[in-house]
Every structure is written in C-alpha cells, then in structure tokens.
Amino acid sequence: MKRLAFVLIAVVALTGGLVSAHESRPLYFELTELQPNQFQFNWRFPASLASFERPSVGFEENCRLEGSEHLIGASGIIRLDCQTAPSQMVLAFPSGNPSLSTVLQYKRLGFAPQLIQVGPGQAIIPLPERVSEGSWWSGYFALGVDHILGGLDHLLLVACLVLLLPNLKALLLAVSGFTLAHSLTLGLAALEFITVPMVIVEALIALSIVALAAELLYRDGPSLGQRYPILVSGTIGLLHGLGFASALREMGLPEEDVLVALFAFNIGVEAGQLGFVALFKLVVIVWYQLRQVPDIWRRGFPELVGVLAAFWFFQRLLLGLAE
C-alpha cells in the first residue's frame, strides 16, 4: 500500500509539467537577410503552446516589422526592415514564459548562418554582428544534447535498459543497437525519405517504455530484453529515431549544410545519452552496494515508470486522434 501511494503521488507530481515529454519543443524562428538590412522573419510555435501563451516579438526602434509585433497564428512569414542590422530580438510573453527554450536560425548576407539557442526564461536574444564558419556544427550539437536531456520519456527508457541489463557487455550491446537503429531512422525521416504518422510513433514510444518497465517487474528467468538485447533495443531505437526526426524537422535544417547539421544533432544526442547512461549506471552501482535496498525503490521505480508511460500512451493517442 505504501509503495502504491508512492507511485501515485510521484505520478501526480510529474504529470503537472512533464507528461508531454516530446511535446515540450522550442519556439522556432528564422531571420534571413534578403537584401542589406531587409529581412524575412519566420516563426513556428509547438503544438503544445496555446494561442494565449504565444509571445510577441520586438527589435530595435530602427527596425519595423510588417504589420505588427504580435504574431498571428502558430506559424507564418513577415518582413522586417531595418536602418542597420538588428543587435537583439526580444520576446514578450502575455502570461509568463511557458518554460520553453528558443531556437533562432540567423542568416546574414556574406556570412555563415548560425543556430542560436537560449533556454527557458531568456527573453532577450543577442544577434551577433558576424557569424563564424562552422557554427551549424556547434549549434546543432548543443541542440542534440539539449533535446535528449530534456526528453523525460527517452531518459526513463534508457534508465530501464540500465536496470534490466546489469551486465556491462550486454548493456553496451543494447546501447549500440539502440544508437544504430535510431541514427538510421533519424536520418531517413529527417531527410524525408520515409514519412510516418507521428501520432502513432509517439504513442508507440510510450508503449515501448511500458514494455520495458513490465520486464523489470515481472521477470521469471531471463526476459526477452536480456536474451536479445540488440534486437529489443534496436526495435525501440527505430521508433525513437522517428521521434527525434519529428522534433528536428520542426526546428528546421539549414539548406546549405543539411548533412553536417543532421550529423551534429545526432552526435549531440549520443553524447547526452552516453553521459546519462554513465551517470545512472554509477547511481545503480552505489544503489546495489547497499545491504538492503528498500522495496519502494526496487519495485517502486519501474511501477512509476510504467504508470507514467501508460498515461503518455493514452494521452498521445487520444490527443493525436482528436486533432
């Protein structure tokens, strides 16, 4: 009874702001110089952002947006005319920043483009006068790291793999299979060689976490994941790669260096994932060094993960079918 209460309380606490997992995608903007000091301004807001939460955008006094600084709709394109190149972009939220980060693609004539990323709560985004070569690499690498560490569903799945496979060799095989699989579908889907309804993909991602949590709870001898770690993790990786690609397509890929940006994003995802695996594995080692591991943690953690992932499954499926 105590364990059940722990699980329910934890789920209620988490569902307050983390149940959407992959839906917490950044605000996305593009600022492209068409002629000297004349820009095209694009925006795209994530589906999770309600219309009353959408920000207005402002620049210096010597810059004038076509129409109004209030952006109409979830996406659009307007013109920005300036006497000199803008030095900053300012976001103004009507009811407080809804804890979303911001991504800006900034392209000036005669300079390499740059991906600028700022965290939640930062309303003033500085715009550099000059942009160094190779900025796509560092920008998309950081975006990959941020995406993986900000994806609660993915982190919980990796945590389940670590707990399911205490043998280091089996864990490395599973992580390798997961990496190869999601890299394949990430590349194919981001480049639009394959297209899959994301409603189904996101729901199946949640269902895959339920399956791993169930393996942790109801093992009678070696489980499927323990017998075939590469097969299981690879299958799950194919789904997660499609989810990564969906987020990357929403943020956009630079036309000039699509493959470089895609590769950098994927390497960032891997760096964040391996860092989390190493840290969580260390926690597990310390955990099992304790003589008595409380049952609330031995079974409570996979129960929490299973309940939360099941909630995600029905939430994503029902909301997706309602659109």
Image (cartoon, rainbow, N blue to C red):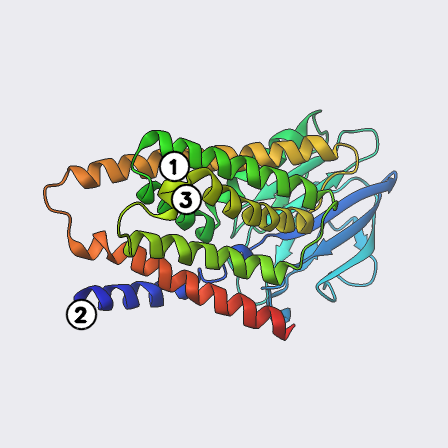
Query: At numbered mark 2, what does the secondary structure look like: helix, strand or loop?
Result: loop
Would you place residue 98 above or below residue 118 in this image? below
Amino acid at circle 1 = Val
Closer-to-camera residue (292/96):
292
First-in-chain label (2 vs 1): 2
Q: What residue is drawn where x is 24% and y is 64%?
A: 6
Query: Which quadrant holds the N terminus?
Result: bottom left
Q: What residue is drawn where x is 56% and y is 32%?
A: 267
Closer-to-camera residue (150/82):
150
Res. 323 image quadrant: bottom right
The residue labelled by disc 3 is 158
Q: Is residue 27 left or right of residue 161?
A: right
The image's mark for residue 1 is 2
Q: Extreme bottom residue here?
A: 322
First-in-chain label (2 vs 3): 2
First-in-chain label (3 vs 1): 3
Q: Is residue 84 left or right of residue 2?
A: right
Amino acid at circle 3 = Val
Q: CA separation, marks 2 and 1?
A: 31 Å
Label 1 crowding class (10 Å Cα cut-off): few <14, some 14-19, many 20+? many
Closer-to-camera residue (71/174):
174
The residue labelled by disc 1 is 277
Label 2 crowding class (10 Å Cα cut-off): few <14, some 14-19, many 20+? few
Amino acid at circle 2 = Met
Q: CA separation, marks 3 and 1?
A: 7 Å
Spot occupied by residue 87 in the image (x, y as percentages of width and height): 70, 40
Q: Is residue 145 left or right of residue 294?
A: right
Q: Does residue 307 appear in the picture of this structure?
A: yes
Q: What residue is drawn where x is 45% and y is 36%?
A: 175
Query: At numbered mark 1, what does the secondary structure look like: helix, strand or loop?
Result: helix
Query: At numbered mark 3, what does the secondary structure look like: helix, strand or loop?
Result: helix
